[in-house]
Image (tube, rainbow, N blue to C red):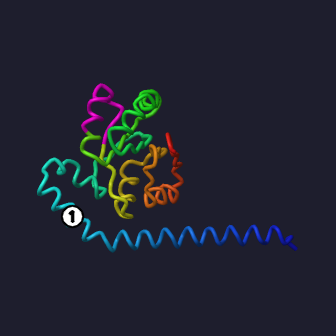
Amino acid sequence: MKSPSKRLKNRNIDVLKITKYAVLRLYNMMVYMILPFGLMGHLLLVWRRPEFRQGFWQRYGILKPMFGQPILIHAASVGELNAIAPLVQQLRLDWPVLVTTTSVTGAARFKQLFTDMPQVEHRFLPFDIGFANRRLLKRIQPRALLLVETELWPGLIAACHQRSIPVWLINGR
């Protein structure tokens, strides 16, 4: 017979698992409910500001594959890219590296920092939508995901967890 403390501990773990699952389900339902409005807003933004056409399809998970199981590093924009430049320069010596950004200015800064490094590539990170995250991970097959500072994407983190891809928060606060 289990001791009362072990039963309580197991019950707490079960409650945590159920709560985590329920919160993630609620998050995904809300994302899919606002998806049509988000898509219309994205199309309007692209129509009004042509520079946002860059990486349009990548934001929905349609991107070219990268071979060699890269380390996937998400740095949202310019500041995060500047912070991770030394790390990327070291990691590229042992593994291919894929850096994702969410901003056009981040993509431009990537080109400035890493043009002479063919083993370092850039893509735009898809929106945090289930199908886009699954497609990203299927096409890229990363060996790990590094999130810079406080760029936390619940859907992406959950998709990585489902595929046993390690996730690390670097330079977090």
**Residue 105: which quarter of the image?**
top left
- Residue 74 lies, in percent from the top left, at 40, 45
Q: Is residue 118 found left or right of 41 in the rendered image? A: right
What is the magenta range? 108-122
Is 113 one of the magenta-colored residues? yes
Q: Residue at x 28, y 50 (%)?
A: 63
Q: Which residue is drawn at 79% across and 72% down?
A: 7
- Residue 77 lies, in percent from the top left, at 33, 42
Residue 46 to residue 37: above or below: above
Q: In which quarter of the image is the N terminus?
A: bottom right
Mark 1 burial class by Cα count in 10 Å: few <14, some 14-19, many 20+: few
Q: Mark 1 points at which residue?
A: 41
Badge 1 marks a residue whose secondary structure is: helix
Is 69 one of the magenta-colored residues? no
Residue 46 to residue 23: above or below: above
In depth, the one of 167 and 102 nearer the eye is: 102
Q: Is residue 48 found left or right of 171 in the rendered image? A: left
- Residue 55 lies, in percent from the top left, at 23, 49
Residue 89 to residue 49: above or below: above
- Give, as a three-letter code, the residue at label 1: Gly
- Residue 154 lies, in percent from the top left, at 46, 60
Residue 99 to residue 31: above or below: above
Q: Is residue 123 found left or right of 150 in the rendered image? A: left
